[in-house]
Amino acid sequence: MHLAILETRELRWPDEAACERFAQDLARAPGLMNASIELHGSLGAGKTTLVRHLLRALGVQGRIKSPSYAVMESYELAEHGGSGVVSHFDFYRFGDPREWEDAGFREIFTSPGLKLSEWPEKAAGMLPVPDLALHLTIADDDSRQLRLEARTPLGQSLMAALSDGAAA
């Protein structure tokens, strides 16, 4: 199945501070709290780091755990009137995409809230079309290359809300 890409943007993060600035910028984007964002990249590319910076920018306090073993971690955001829920998924350990269905995630993906999915290819064919797909790669100089793909009108509006500083 080929997913339509409505718009793309290429970014370079020379360091983790640039990733943090991007996350802060994305956190201010209208509509983010009902978006689905996929994070693609090899081990160590920065997917979990980006999610941690985004959760901090959204006001999450305390320890932010990687969902590598639990598959999903949820966060209730007080700043969003108690209705702001972020679900962070890590499908790395899935051996079969049907595990997504067996785990009961369909209900979460059809409910309000921000969904952040690492290793979405491990749940291929089960996940709904993401609003944004983020592809992270490690460059030779250890910087990160980021390709953003808007796959829905919401994804396009999220991309449009990013400042030029996020595209540095």
Image: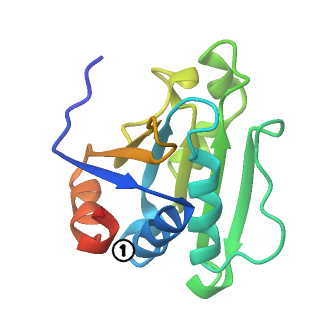
| Residue lying farthest to the left in this orientation | 6
> Whole-percent x and y of residue 163?
27, 74
Q: Which residue is mark 1?
A: 29
Q: Secondary structure at mark 1?
A: loop
Pinpoint residue 55: horizontal percent, then vertical percent: 62, 68
Quarter of image, res 26? bottom left
From the image, which quarter does the N terminus lie in? top left
Q: Which residue occupies 42% across, 57% down?
A: 35
Residue at coordinates 63% horizontally, 31% vertically from top-left?
43
Residue 53 is left or right of residue 159, and the answer is: right
- Tell me where residue 161 sits by quadrant: bottom left
Residue type at mark 1 is: Ala
State which quadrant residue 151 falls in. top left
Front-most of residues 25 and 107 = 25
Q: Quadrant of the C terminus?
A: bottom left
Numbered-mark total: 1
